[in-house]
């Protein structure tokens, strides 16, 4: 069974709510018949050196130099049970809870500078998929 692991820089008082959002997404996917269940566990992340600093810098870069107050890196581990689709596609769908999708213009000329349309992450994150 695949496992999806998000390491997320999140304020301590919002970490549980984010876990609930991931769990709600799993329940909706189960109700739609996409998977059977998707248990979500959260733990304190044990990161390689520099990863937490990189996530903090990412937040500063995307939010005009501000820091994410009282934030810690939390690991969210999801196990999509009974899922037979693309785990990569599922992972990217779940990442929308952390980084909203940008509304892109229909004009191909305006799309040439795609980075101008990117939205900052609500919470900076990294992801790994284990198969």
Image: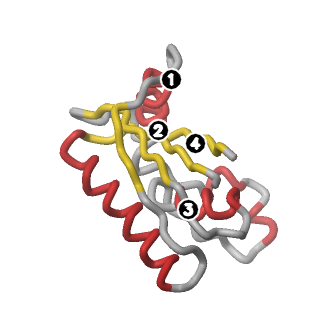
Q: Which coloring applies here?
A: secondary structure
Earlier residue among tags 2 and 3: 2
Earlier residue among tags 1 and 4: 1
Label drawn at residue 127: 4
Residue at x 47% of width, y 84% of height: 31
- Is 45 situated above or below 88? above
Pointer 4 with pointer 2, Cβ within 8 A: yes
Earlier residue among tags 2 and 1: 2
Label drawn at residue 75: none
Pointer 2 with pointer 1, Cβ within 8 A: yes
Q: Tell me the CA gap for discs 1 and 4.
A: 12 Å
Between label 3 and label 1, give the one nearer the viewer.
Answer: 3
Q: Which residue is mark 2?
A: 7
Q: Tell me the CA gap for discs 3 and 1.
A: 26 Å
Q: Position of residue 51 (x, y in %)?
A: 50, 23
Q: Which residue is mark 1?
A: 51
Q: Which residue is mark 3?
A: 80
Q: Say what secondary structure mark 3 lies in.
A: loop
The residue lying toward the viewer, choosing from 32 and 1, is: 1
Q: Tell me the CA gap for discs 4 and 2.
A: 6 Å
């Amino acid at each position: 069974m695949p496992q999806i692991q998000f390491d997320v820089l999140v304020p301590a008082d919002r970490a549980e709510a984010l876990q609930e959002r991931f769990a709600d997404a799993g329940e909706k996917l189960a109700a739609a018949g996409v998977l059977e269940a998707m248990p979500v566990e959260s733990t304190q992340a044990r990161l390689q050196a520099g990863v937490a600093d990189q996530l903090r810098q990412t937040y500063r870069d995307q939010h005009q130099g501000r820091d994410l107050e009282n934030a810690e890196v939390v690991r969210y581990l999801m196990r999509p049970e009974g899922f037979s689709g693309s785990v990569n596609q599922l992972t990217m769908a779940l990442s929308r809870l952390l980084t909203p999708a940008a509304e892109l213009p229909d004009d191909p000329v305006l799309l040439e500078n795609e980075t101008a349309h990117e939205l900052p992450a609500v919470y900076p994150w990294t992801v790994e998929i284990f198969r």
